[in-house]
Image (tube, grey):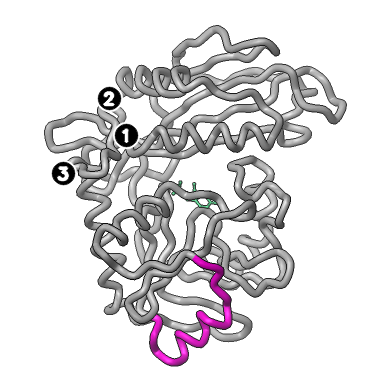
Amino acid sequence: MDFHHIDFAKQYSDHMFMADYDGNGWKDFRIEPYHNISLSPANPAIHYGQSIFEGLKAYKNPQNEVLIFRPQKNFARMNISAARMMMPQIPEAMFMDGMHQLIDLDRNWVPDVEGTSLYIRPFLFATDEYIGVRPSDTFKFMIITCPVGAYYAKPVKVKIEEHYTRAVKGGTGFAKTAGNYAASLYPAHQAQKEGYDQLIWTDGQFHQHIEESGTMNIMFVINDTLITAPVGDTILNGITRDSVLELARDWEMKVEVRPFEVSELIAAIENNTLQEAFGVGTAATIAHIEVIGYRDTDYTLDLNKRQFSTKLLDTLNDIRYGKTADKFGWNYLV
Ligand SMILES: Cc1ncc(COP(=O)(O)O)c(C=O)c1O
């Protein structure tokens, strides 16, 4: 494989980790060659979406060691998703040791070219052979990996969505579960047909507050203050978001985690106080936003002002690629 030209998520590494839940406990922890799996046609994950996943990345440092970024956070979030979706809790040792041994075995799949990494996808899904609507008794946990390059090579064009809804209070927005993503495909496709890369979701009730994007949390810098929405039950508690907030506070930047209205954003664009808008997520890292579409207007942002997000991207990259001191203890050495 040529790590200089990686097609996103097209080629998977040699091995995968698997374990089964038989209704009482976890068993058969194993690493196998990457291969197709067979499922009952009555599988409830297929019919009813009882399925959750995580996404994290491993990086090569200059000493050719492999570092995984904050995997315990993904482990914790996966169990929050599992509880909401009536799935068994995942033991920490299974998640961490399974991942460790898998990445150790496939360490040659961790690319060493600038901007690249190994994407790690743990997932858990129902496996009963039963077509009635009820929680499955049996489940399969797996981890697959694939080398990835940069996600958005250039600044993105986003559209503020006021018709479709990703999540509502009391729903599953905070869980990383299959159906959230399935439901987002059509609205995202409509926006893409209009020339946008991504949506910015607003609250499901009044479409007044900014929530998050398709695969990223969203942040703004206005009057030198970093602003982002609080995570509740409608927004995924992003690990990149958490890291960015920690860095901003460490740099003694003013941070406001509060409900943020679309009207405030538009006013800040119009009165020229919006300095930066960007998405933050594992896949995208930091995605600078160049155009925000709202109703019939496309607002083009001045990318020359993106000092904070550029510093963030550089700092996060330096930590993840092991080029600077890991003062927060975020890296897990394989
Ligand atoms: C809906 C959604 N929001 C936000 C994020 C960003 O979360 P993280 O930084 O943990 O990747 C993701 C990606 O995982 C996502 O799918």
Residue 315, position in %: x, y? 23, 55
- Figure quadrant of the N terminus: top left
Using the rendered view, name the quadrant where residue 64 is placed.
Answer: top left
Q: Residue at x 60, y 64 (%)?
A: 201
> Which label sits on residue 334?
2
**Mark 3 and mark 2 residues within 8 Å of each other at the beta carbon:** no
Residue found farthest to the right: 132
In the depicted structure, whether residue 154 falls above or below residue 124 = below
Q: Residue at x 43, y 92 (%)?
A: 271
Q: What kind of residue is marked 3? A: Ala
Residue 13, position in %: x, y? 39, 26
Earlier along the polypeptide chain: callout 3 or callout 1? 1
**Badge 3 local density, few (<14 within 10 Å), some, or many (20+)?**
few
Name the residue beneath numbered marker 1.
68
Q: Which callout, 3 or 2, points to the residue nearer the camera?
A: 3
Q: Magenta region: which residues?
A: 258-274
Cα–Cα span, label 1 and label 2? 7 Å
Q: What kind of residue is marked 1? A: Ile
For the residue labelled by badge 2, is the local secondary structure a helix, a strand or a loop?
loop
**In the image, is 242 to the left or to the right of 84?**
left
**Mark 1 and mark 2 residues within 8 Å of each other at the beta carbon:** yes
Name the residue beneath numbered marker 3.
325
